[in-house]
Each structure stands twice: as C-alpha cells, then as structure tokens.
Amino acid sequence: MSSSTRVLFQLQLILCFLLYLHARPAICFAILTNCKIDKIYQLGDSLSDTGNRIVEDPLDACGSLPYGQNFPRGPTGRCSDGMLMIDHFALAAGIPFLNPYLKGNANFTHGVNFAVGGSTALSEYALAEKDIMLLGTSSTLGIQLDWMSTFFASQCNTHINRLCPGNFKHALFMVGETGGNDYNFALAQGKSIEEAKTLVPEVVEIIRDAVRRVIDLGASRIIVPGNFPIGCFPMTLIMFKSDSKSAYDEHRCLKDFNDLAAFHNQYLQQAIITLQEENPGTTIVYGDYYNAFNWLLYNAPYLGIDAKSALEPCCGNGGIDSESSPTSGGCGSLNAQVCLYPDRYISWDGIHLTRKAYSVLSKWLLADITPKLKCALQVVDH
C-alpha cells in the first residue's frame, strides 16, 4: 500500500468512525472482511475471556447476573454487561463470536478463545519468586500457548488441514492484552510503583517470546495490545486514593499508575519493532489500548457518557469517593447495586468496562489497526 493510499484509507476510516458515533447514517460494516480474516485466535485475560474462567471456576462472578445482562445470551463469563472488544473484532471480520477453548464440544471453525480471566504473563513460579501471589487462575500466558499448540496438533491429527499450522494466511492472532494483572497483583499486595516497574522487562520478554511462538505455529498477522491507563480505573482510584492534588491529572486519574502503564507500553512497542525486523514476512501490529481509552475519556461527554460517572463503576457498592473497593461488595455479590443506564458509564465493575466503552474502543482500534494490516475498507449504508 502506497503512502498516499494509506493516508486516504485512514481518512476514510476516521470518517466512517465519526459517522457511526454521531450522525449514524452508516457504519463500518465487516471492516475486517477485506482482510479476508476467517479465524481469530485470542490469548489474554478477562478483557478478552468469553468463558474459560467460569469453566475453571463455575462460581466466578462473571458467570452470573448482572454480568451479561446486555449480552444476547445472558451471562457467558464475559466480565462486562455485554460484548467485549474481541466480540466486536469478530463481527468486523464477519465471523461468529469465539468460543472458549475449555468448552471442549464447541465449534472452533472460526477460531478459539484461549484467554482466561485473571491470567498473568509471568508464570506462577516466577511471580512467587517475587513474593507475588496469583489471585485466581493459574492458566497464565504460557499455559494458554500450550493449549494452542495442543489444539492445533489435535486438528492436524484429524486431517482438518485448514486448521493446521502453515494454513493461517487469513487468520488473526491476538496476543493479549496481557501483563496488566502482573502489575495489578503486585500493587494490590503492597509493592510500590517502582517495584512494579521492575517487572516490565520480564513481562515484555514473556510477551515477545509468546509472539515468536505463535509465529512458529504459522501466524502471519498478529496484534499485540498494550495496557490501558490503569490510573483511570475505579479500582485503582479507590485502593490508592491520594490526599495530594498533584497525584492526579486533568481527568482525575492517578498519574503514577498511568506512567507505569505507559512505561510497559513503550517497552512493548520496542519489542514489537525488534520482532518485526526479525520476521519481515509477518505483520505484527501494536494495539494502542492506552490512547484509545484516553480518546474515550476525553470525548465521553460527546458519546453520551455522564461526566460525573466517567470514572465511576456502574456495578458494585461504592465509587471513587467510597472507602470500599470494587472487590469487596462488588459486582455480582449479594445486594450489589447496579446503575440504571450502563451505557452512560465507562467502567462496569471498577475493573472491567461496559459494553458501550468496549464498542467505542473497538471502533477506534479498528480505525487505527486495519490500515496496518493492509486491508481495504467496506462501508455499508443502513
């Protein structure tokens, strides 16, 4: 794609995005179909998990109402009130929602979701060496990669050649988001911001090795997402409330925690540059979750999101001015409160986002990522 064509394409995507958000006479329908993506394979944590965690733990809160109250099938293990970003990516590619890997009898024709809520990049052993306990699943990124390898090997053994490594020309691999829980668990267990930052090189090395591994499995198009600005999440704002006004930015987010996420993202982008140089025949794209979220937060008033609730959780007892955290008396617990209009909120439960937020973020990310995947644009009027 020439530079002039790329610029024109990006302008078309931006126009389509703005039409969707405001005038709404048209939407970017099946925007990834011109990439001819026929399968998506997802690795990651609760931002992407469509049901693996509740197979491991049927009592996990994300498997019951009010989670999934605005999803067509009700609660499925998605940690939101509705669709996640991976669901929007699947729709944009024109394929069905991804089934979770641990749902063994599911249809995996169009890809598999290996993500597990609460997973980390670092292994349980590596975290324990740093005096950090896993707070949930032990199905870390490495375990998910093992599942992926096992799955592909089993498909080839049954001679379903289109699912064998080497036949992924039109497949999309999502390596993350991952790493966020490594830092969240460290901070929740008393580590300082500076101590959490020392984890970054090792976390990014694990992600880099994961990308190399999926390339070895046959991946030719890979998206590697960064971390959100965690200093804007209610969980962080409640747990690490500061009396110092200088600790907050203009959006009332905690600056030091956002700096941690930015540091991770910078390190990750450098690793992606190295990976791209090592693998010129593979397309490796950074998923800019950080700036997508900042765009959403900045434009919240124009998107129907109440300014007063932009940093408040919709579901759970207590907000950022409360003494309780989203994880105590939080969403899914007995007598937990749920807001009347989730689409006016960014945060669903203080940790995860609402379907409205995920929808807007997905469109921003598609507008940013699709040109880098060297795809064309398709606009359908409605």
Image (cartoon, grey):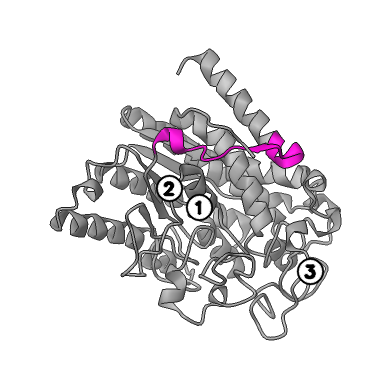
Q: Is residue 147 above or below residue 28?
A: below
Q: CA distance from mark 3 to mark 1?
A: 25 Å
Q: Secondary structure at mark 2?
A: strand
In the image, 127 versus 51, the foreground residue is 51
Disc 2 versus disc 1: nearer the observer: 1
| Residue at which label 2 appears | 174
Q: Are marks 2 and 3 in contact (CB under 8 Å)?
A: no
Left or right? Give the position of 306 relative to 46: right
Mark positioned earlier in the residue sequence (2 or 1): 1
Q: Nearer the viewer, residue 22 or 365?
A: 22
Identify whether 342 is placed above or below 175: below
Task: Examine the structure image and report whether residue 21 is included in the region drawn in magenta.
Answer: yes
For label 2, the crowd category at 10 Å Cα-Cα, with few meaning under 14, some 14 to 19 and many 20 or more, is many
First-in-chain label (2 vs 3): 2
Q: Is residue 110 left or right of residue 72?
A: left
Apparent side of residue 264 relative to residue 164 in the rendered image (left or right): right
On the rendered image, what quadrant is the N terminus found in? Answer: top left
Q: CA distance from mark 2 to mark 1?
A: 9 Å
Q: Could you tell me the amino acid type at mark 3? A: Leu
Residue occupied by mark 3: 340
Q: Is residue 259 visible?
A: no
Q: Which mark is residue 86?
A: 1
- Which quadrant would the C terminus be assigned to in this image? top right
